[in-house]
Image (cartoon, rainbow, N blue to C red):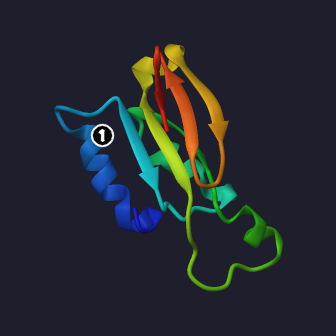
Amino acid sequence: MHGFYQGIEVVKDLCCSAQSPDVILLQEHWLTPANLHLLSDNIASHYSFGKSAIDDRVTLGPLVGRPYGGAAILIKNELQMVTECIFCADRYVVVRVGNFDYC
């Protein structure tokens, strides 16, 4: 995404398209832990699993310099009942949707 605000419009267009994918993998959203809700707030058709890569930097004080990292997976709302989060880290997220694993 090269930052949430740089890439969110492309993700919204993808989610609203006629052939919207069931699973969307995102990286480099640069969101702080307090702002991860922005993924769910801006995309109503999908729900998200994700983590900030700058947890430790935020706890040390004001964020200085360019942010980095962050991984998330968006899953279509219709698949929520068959989706399970296996592992969520700052650099990768693993979920199981039905009989498939997405990393």
- Give x and y (percent) for residue 85: 61, 29
Give the residue at x 33% y 50%: 11
Residue 36 versus residue 101 in the image, above or below: below
Of residues 84 and 78, the one nearer the viewer is 84
- Give x and y (percent) for residue 18: 16, 32
Residue type for callout 1: Cys
Regarding mark 1 in the picture, which secondary structure is present there?
A: helix
For label 1, the crowd category at 10 Å Cα-Cα, with few meaning under 14, some 14 to 19 and many 20 or more, is: many
Give the residue at x 53% y 52%: 71
- Give x and y (percent) for residue 3: 45, 67
Of residues 71 and 18, the one nearer the viewer is 71
Q: Quadrant of residue 15?
A: top left
Q: Quadrant of the N terminus?
A: bottom left
Residue 88 versus residue 91 in the image, above or below: above
Give the residue at x 60% y 52%: 36
Residue 31 versus residue 94 in the image, above or below: below
Q: Residue furthest bottom?
A: 65
Which residue is tagged 1? 15
